[in-house]
Image (spheres, rainbow, N blue to C red):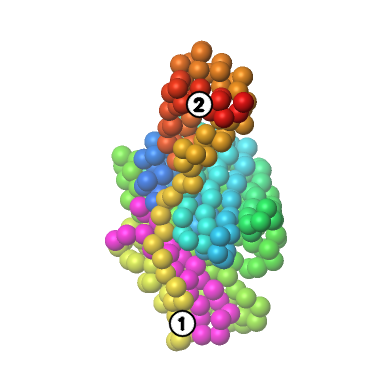
Amino acid sequence: MGDQLIWATDRDGQIRLIAARTTELVAEAQSRHKSWPTATAALGRAMTAALLMGAMQKGEEKITLRILGDGPLGAIVAQSNAQGEVRGYVQNPTLDWPSRSPEKLDVGGAVGATGHLHVTRDLGLKESYTGSAPLVSGEIAEDLTHYFATSEQTPTAVALGVLLNEDGTVQAAGGYLLQLLPGVSEEKIEHLEKKIKELGPISYFFASGKDVASLLDPLLPEEDKKILAQKKPFFQCQCDRLRLETMLKSLGAQELAEMRKEQGGAEVVCHFCNEQYIFSVDELIALEKELE
Ligand SMILES: [Zn+2]
């Protein structure tokens, strides 16, 4: 079963559900970054979160989620858009971090419980807005729940999960955002809280082979719930050779000449996708000429 992203709502439009199965795209991130288990879990949760938040945007808008905890994993950055394209990286992907138990990776410990998360919405035309909140546990889903409650004043249940195989590859990943719009009754809220508990960890839900639409029954209690849209999300980086040429040119002709003489060319690696771009001596000379 491939990755899926859905938008759904209940009959009254009071409950909004955005849910995704992200097994394939997290597996791609793991293989691109050659990340170790705790880093894979943290990055997979962050990328799934960014994907779900990106799905709340419109048109060409983008969102960037930055999780800056004081733990040894370093910064985690994930970026997504309304098209379901997501990319991300973690500063220290090969961190060797002890688990709490064989099934429970210690993401909170590796991320750190002290720090902040920042959500930047890039609305195009150089207009952007950043909201921030302190981290609560470093487990990412809890931190985002807190962010939605404080920074966006929208009660949101956030579930994010990545389940790994024994060899560190990805078995299942996914998550959901369940937002309660004004006017939801206490009764409905209690019912939802019970259902969320019954669902258990979202990674196990997807590992059992269920699809995203199976989340509708437990999470949208009314009869007339509906899927508003669906898409296949994927790992997609925005880097290309032209962008990196621009970046190299911004270093200036002198710097390029030094690289060419000292290193016999230039090697640039994209943070987000780990793609390596090699620029030969002749290519650097051409860039220097463009700068003159
Ligand atoms: Zn890239």
* Contact? badges 1 and 2 (CB < 8 Å): no
Q: Residues within 10 Å of mark 2 (few under 14, many from 20)?
A: few
Q: Which mark is residue 286?
A: 2
Residue under the point 48% across and 42% down: 239
User: At which x and y percent is residue 123?
Assistant: 64, 59
Stretch of the chain drawn in magenta: 1-24
Q: Disc 1 or disc 2, which is closer to the eye?
A: 2
Placement of 130 over or under 176, stated as above or below: above
User: At which x and y percent is residue 54?
Assistant: 54, 59
Label 1 to label 2: alpha-carbon separation = 59 Å
User: At which x and y percent is residue 130?
Assistant: 69, 53
Reply yes or no: does residue 14 show up in magenta.
Answer: yes
Residue type at tag 2: Ala
Quadrant showing the C terminus: top right
Residue on which disc 1 sits: 225
Label 1: element kind: loop
User: At which x and y percent is residue 291?
Assistant: 60, 28
Residue type at tag 1: Lys
Quadrant showing the N terminus: bottom left
Q: How many marks?
A: 2
Depth order, front residue of 89/44: 89
Residue under the point 43% across and 32% down: 277
Kindly tell me whether residue 165 is visible in this rendering. yes
Placement of 271 over or under 10, stated as above or below: above
Kindly tell me whether residue 128 is visible in this rendering. no
Image quadrant in which you'd find residue 168:
top left
Reply yes or no: does residue 47 show up in magenta.
Answer: no
Disc nearer the start of the sequence (1/2): 1
